[in-house]
């Protein structure tokens, strides 16, 4: 009885972990794909079936040939051997014995002779048509055959012994590959698309928005939490009511405001309007009202100014709330796309932010998945690193959004 | 007695200052009223802008006049109003001056040189770390002080180096060069005058003369502390919001320059539908509808008779349909797995924090980056999703000896699957966020309830249905409304994931409301019409928020 119970418990736990691991894989897979593709060679991104480990074709130097030659698996007898491709575009024909057309031989055209000589080539009736006959020599045996179709072959040689050679179709040959990574993709996409400038812009904007928003939210939150002035509670209700207002309602008038003050296409438009938020003020106010009043009153009696109290008592006590607001704002500023898309001219490359550059890169490097993924990684990595360092605050900023409304 | 004489001179100085202040406010009041007249007489600005400026100036003028009276009567509210008006004047001169001198536009130039300076910001961090390291020597104040000093010096040097590297000197020089017309000088004079007036009113003797007490100090501090946030909020949020409401009633069009009041015309056009009964189900549109006005939206049959629906703005209705479809599909797909995962994570098994961290990962990544990744996952020829489908089909065919065909879905270019592709990607990105919210809700459920249920002999499922689900209802409600609000604002996902031109394709199958707004407002620049669309969306979202608010009131939840 007890042992059955334990088996059931074990199965339940195993099932739970199986589901958890399945979803973890599902959540991580796109990022794995991104990193692996960002390290691939372009041809590797188009290989089917797709593979996660970046691989590149091996090349070797072959005695008697210039440069490095790509290696393929060549069928030598029944054995697959790594051979180097030294010559392509060899015109070849597919030949068959007219009496036994099921068995075909692919042979280079330069190596067959008209049966009976060029002037008096013999013919045979094949499939009801008068067809020319060719002498095809395979392993010393010459057979007159008919040509069924034409194709192109490559010449593959054994890199150690170039006299051993095989002709086979290049496209159907399996390349010899080894795992190789190409970190150059990152530098290539950075310089190619001006991503370095976009990265600088995004960094600057994020630092400015986070700092500015922390300052205005702390000051405003303190006023709303602790200082009595006429209209305070009504103002608080107004602030609360505007938190849920979607940005899309604001986008047209805010754009017109930017036109009015001449900030269209300027970085100021990405910074200044975003450092005053109702949400941050609300968050800080909610935290400040939980701090006991007694400490503050004692400091006031000692003659400390309001600013000193805020700096010496409130800010040290509210580091978790500040960190939560900072992470929230950081994500918002780093990932924002709609507003930059509207306000920054697509032609003005110097003022692009990362997200904007990426959306343009998508169209420009449509065939270079490796470059696009390197760009995506540049955009996605910084939040991930910050997330790994300060996971707690990210989770808190998500749950604290539950305080809204 | 010298002290009395001193007191008397102090008194007379204060009353002199107060007289100056009163005169200043009268001048200010008259200047503001004159400004209104001037604006209507000569300024070339648009009418709505003139109205806004006039209202502000009128408020300043009237307020300033009242202030002068109150100052004469030595009432403390006169001091408060005076300080507020002078503070606002000071800020105006400062910010307008910065704008005129090009300080805000200078951010662009700074971004160009910021890369050179960024390494010195690392020095600031180093300095901070040095001071923080000093805190380890709590018992050796001398050593701690040395560390703090070194830290401070490193921070200052790095900061100076940073400012020099990003071109502080060039910036200042550029600023000085801007003093080439009278405006900056006027603003500078204004700045100095307002500062003097603030000082004159702020000083303690004046405060005493105006009978200001601690309560008033607190009020002033409160307003001062809130002012940056409040002013920014008014300028960049409340003002634009009201303006957007106004624009929704105009035919504001940046290409034609129209900006006339058209009343409800935009809204009428948006919602103008026509339903006509057809003689035959396949009757041509031209016979049934006035095709000058209406486009065919859809046809349907009720009780054997056919109807056709025509819409004046077909794209709006298509966008509405797509947005609602997106909501209906994305909600269960992102919420049901989240509920399951949250329950598993709440089981106190080892490693749960690790899983939670992984699930949350997608929601912190930029939508643009995520969409780029998924665009390749959805690739019809070499994408992993089709590869997974082909492999599964082959596997099933192999096991059950079936002959299912490989569907080879062209996810992003097929009108039937494009929206679904957006749904799947969005759900993937939202699951972790919802899981964390659910987990927080689950952890608030008291454990005794489960124990009580166990005592009553309830099984796992019974507990889930009878304890977890009812008690999680407030969280669920919050998650659902948040998800709906997010889903209604669908834009970036479509814009980046679907590679059609114009975005929203193929054949408008992924056109969302916000995307439609974007096209109207920023590609055709019919911003009046776009504002109307925005307000329709706003009213829907506001309705959902209100629902949430009432629900929370009723449920008394802690959200």
Image (spheres, rainbow, N blue to C red):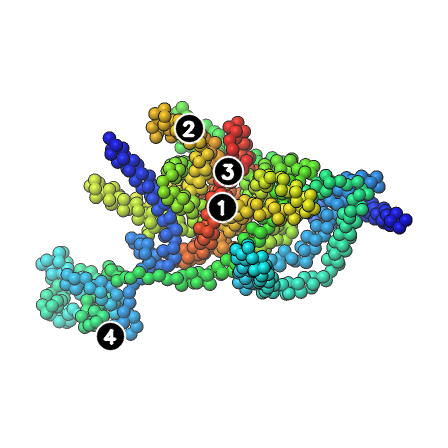
For disc 4, the marked residue is: A63
Which circle, 4 or 3, is nearer the viewer? 3
Real-space Cα distance between discs 1 and 3? 14 Å
Kindly tell me whether residue B243 is visible in this rendering: no
Residue at image coords 33%, 41%: A17
Q: Quadrant of residue A62?
A: bottom left
Q: Secondary structure at mark 3?
A: helix
Which circle, 2 or 1, is nearer the viewer? 2
Q: Are marks 1 and 4 on the same chain?
A: yes
Kindly tell me whether residue B53 is visible in this rendering: yes
Residue at image coords 46%, 28%: B277
Of residues B221 and A83, which is closer to you in this image? B221
For disc 2, the marked residue is: B449
Q: Extreme bottom residue here?
A: A64
Q: Residues within 10 Å of mark 2 (few under 14, many from 20)?
A: few
Real-space Cα distance between discs 3 and 2? 24 Å
Q: Position of residue B315 (x, y in %)?
A: 49, 40
In the rendered structure, the answer to whether residue A178 lies left or right of residue A206 reads left
Which circle, 1 or 4, is nearer the viewer? 1
Q: Chain of mark 2?
A: B
User: Where, quadrant-wise, is the N terminus of chain A in this rendering?
Assistant: top left
Real-space Cα distance between discs 2 and 4? 81 Å
Which label sits on residue A402? 3
Residue at image coords 34%, 56%: A45
Residue at image coords 39%, 57%: A38
Which label sits on residue A393? 1
In the rendered structure, the answer to whether residue A148 lies left or right of residue B164 reads left
Of label 1 and label 4, which has the lower sequence position? 4
Q: Chain of mark 1?
A: A
Of residues B431 and B445, which is closer to you in this image? B445
Q: Are marks 2 and 4 on the same chain?
A: no
Cβ atoms under marks 2 and 4 closer than 8 Å: no
């Amino acid at each position: 009885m007890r042992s059955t119970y334990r088996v059931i418990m074990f199965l339940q736990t195993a099932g739970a972990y199986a589901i958890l691991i399945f979803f973890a894989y599902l959540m991580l897979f796109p990022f794995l794909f991104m990193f692996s593709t960002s390290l691939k060679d372009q041809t590797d991104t188009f290989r089917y079936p797709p593979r996660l480990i970046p691989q590149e074709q091996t090349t070797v130097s072959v005695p008697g040939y210039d440069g490095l030659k790509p290696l393929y698996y060549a069928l030598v007898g029944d054995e697959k051997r790594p051979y180097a491709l030294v010559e392509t575009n060899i015109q070849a024909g597919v030949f068959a014995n007219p009496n036994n057309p099921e068995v075909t031989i692919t042979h280079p055209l330069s190596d067959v002779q008209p049966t009976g000589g060029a002037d008096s080539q013999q013919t045979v009736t094949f499939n009801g048509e008068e067809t020319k006959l060719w002498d095809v020599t395979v392993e010393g045996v010459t057979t007159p055959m008919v040509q069924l179709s034409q194709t192109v072959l490559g010449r593959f040689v054994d890199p150690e012994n170039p006299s051993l050679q095989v002709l086979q179709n290049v496209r159907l040959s399996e390349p010899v590959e080894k795992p190789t990574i190409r970190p150059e993709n990152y530098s290539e996409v950075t310089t190619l698309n001006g991503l370095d400038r976009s990265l600088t812009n995004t960094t600057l904007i994020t630092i400015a928005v986070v700092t500015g928003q922390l300052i205005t939210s702390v000051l405003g939150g303190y006023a709303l939490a602790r200082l009595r002035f006429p209209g305070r509670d009504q103002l608080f209700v107004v602030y609360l009511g505007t938190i849920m207002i979607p940005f899309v309602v604001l986008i047209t008038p805010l754009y017109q405001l930017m036109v009015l003050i001449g900030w269209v296409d300027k970085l100021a438009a990405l910074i200044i309007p975003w450092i005053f938020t109702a949400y941050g003020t609300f968050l800080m106010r909610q935290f400040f009202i939980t701090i006991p009043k007694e400490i503050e009153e004692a400091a006031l009696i000692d003659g400390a100014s309001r600013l000193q109290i805020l700096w010496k008592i409130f800010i040290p006590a509210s580091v978790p709330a500040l960190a939560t607001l900072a992470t929230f704002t950081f994500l918002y500023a780093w990932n924002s796309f709609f507003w930059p898309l509207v306000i920054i001219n697509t032609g003005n490359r110097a003022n692009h932010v990362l997200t904007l550059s990426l959306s343009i890169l998508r169209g420009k490097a449509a065939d270079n998945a490796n470059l696009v993924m390197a760009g995506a990684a540049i955009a996605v990595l910084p939040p991930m690193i910050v997330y790994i360092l300060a996971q707690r605050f990210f989770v808190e900023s998500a749950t604290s959004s539950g305080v809204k409304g | 007695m010298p002290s009395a004489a001193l007191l008397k001179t102090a008194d007379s100085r204060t009353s002199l200052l107060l007289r100056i202040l009163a005169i200043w406010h009268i001048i200010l009041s008259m200047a503001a009223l004159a400004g209104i007249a001037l604006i209507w007489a000569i300024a070339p600005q648009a009418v709505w802008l003139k109205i806004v400026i006039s209202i502000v100036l009128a408020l300043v003028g009237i307020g300033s006049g009242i202030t002068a009276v109150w100052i004469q009567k030595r009432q403390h509210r006169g001091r408060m109003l005076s300080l507020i008006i002078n503070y606002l004047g000071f800020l105006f001169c400062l910010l307008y001056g910065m704008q005129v001198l090009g300080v805000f536009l200078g951010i662009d130039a700074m971004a160009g040189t910021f890369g050179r300076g960024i390494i010195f910001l690392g020095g600031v961090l180093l300095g901070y770390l040095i001071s923080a390291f000093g805190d380890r020597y709590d018992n050796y104040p001398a050593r701690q002080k040395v560390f703090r000093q070194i830290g401070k010096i490193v921070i200052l040097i790095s900061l100076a180096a940073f400012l020099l590297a990003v071109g502080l000197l060039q910036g200042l020089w550029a600023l000085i060069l801007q003093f080439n017309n009278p405006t900056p000088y006027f603003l500078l004079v204004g700045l100095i005058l307002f500062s003097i007036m603030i000082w004159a009113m702020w000083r303690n003797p004046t405060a005493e003369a105006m009978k200001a007490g601690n309560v008033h100090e607190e009020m002033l501090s409160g307003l001062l502390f809130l002012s940056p946030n409040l002013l920014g909020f008014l300028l960049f949020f409340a003002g634009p919001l009201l303006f957007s409401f106004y624009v929704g009633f105009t035919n504001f069009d940046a290409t034609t320059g129209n900006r006339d009041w058209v009343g409800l015309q935009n809204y009428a056009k948006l919602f103008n539908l026509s339903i006509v009964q057809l003689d035959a189900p396949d009757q041509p549109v031209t016979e049934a509808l006035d095709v000058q006005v209406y486009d065919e939206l859809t046809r349907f049959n009720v009780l054997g008779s056919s109807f056709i629906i025509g819409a004046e703005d077909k794209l709006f209705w298509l966008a509405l349909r797509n947005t609602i479809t997106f909501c209906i599909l994305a909600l269960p797909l992102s919420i049901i797995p989240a509920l399951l995962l949250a329950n598993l994570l709440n089981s106190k098994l080892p490693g749960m924090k690790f899983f939670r961290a992984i699930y949350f990962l997608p929601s912190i990544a930029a939508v643009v980056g995520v969409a780029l990744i998924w665009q390749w996952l959805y690739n019809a020829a070499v994408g992993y999703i089709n590869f997974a489908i082909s492999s599964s089909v082959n596997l099933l065919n192999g096991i059950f000896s079936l002959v299912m065909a490989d569907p080879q879905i062209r996810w992003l270019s097929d009108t039937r699957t494009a929206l679904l592709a957006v749904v799947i990607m969005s759900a993937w990105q939202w699951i972790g966020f919802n899981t964390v919210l659910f987990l927080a809700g689950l952890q608030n459920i008291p454990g005794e309830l489960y124990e009580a249920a166990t005592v009553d002999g309830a099984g796992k499922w019974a507990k889930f249905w009878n304890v977890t689900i009812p008690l999680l209802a407030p969280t669920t409600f919050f998650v659902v409304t948040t998800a709906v609000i997010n889903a209604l604002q669908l834009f970036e996902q479509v814009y980046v994931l679907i590679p059609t031109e114009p975005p929203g394709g193929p054949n408008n199958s992924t056109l969302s409301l916000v995307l439609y707004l974007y096209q109207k407002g920023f590609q055709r620049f019919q911003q009046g019409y776009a504002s109307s669309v925005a307000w329709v969306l706003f009213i829907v979202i506001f309705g959902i928020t209100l629902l949430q608010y009432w629900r929370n009131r009723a449920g008394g939840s802690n959200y």
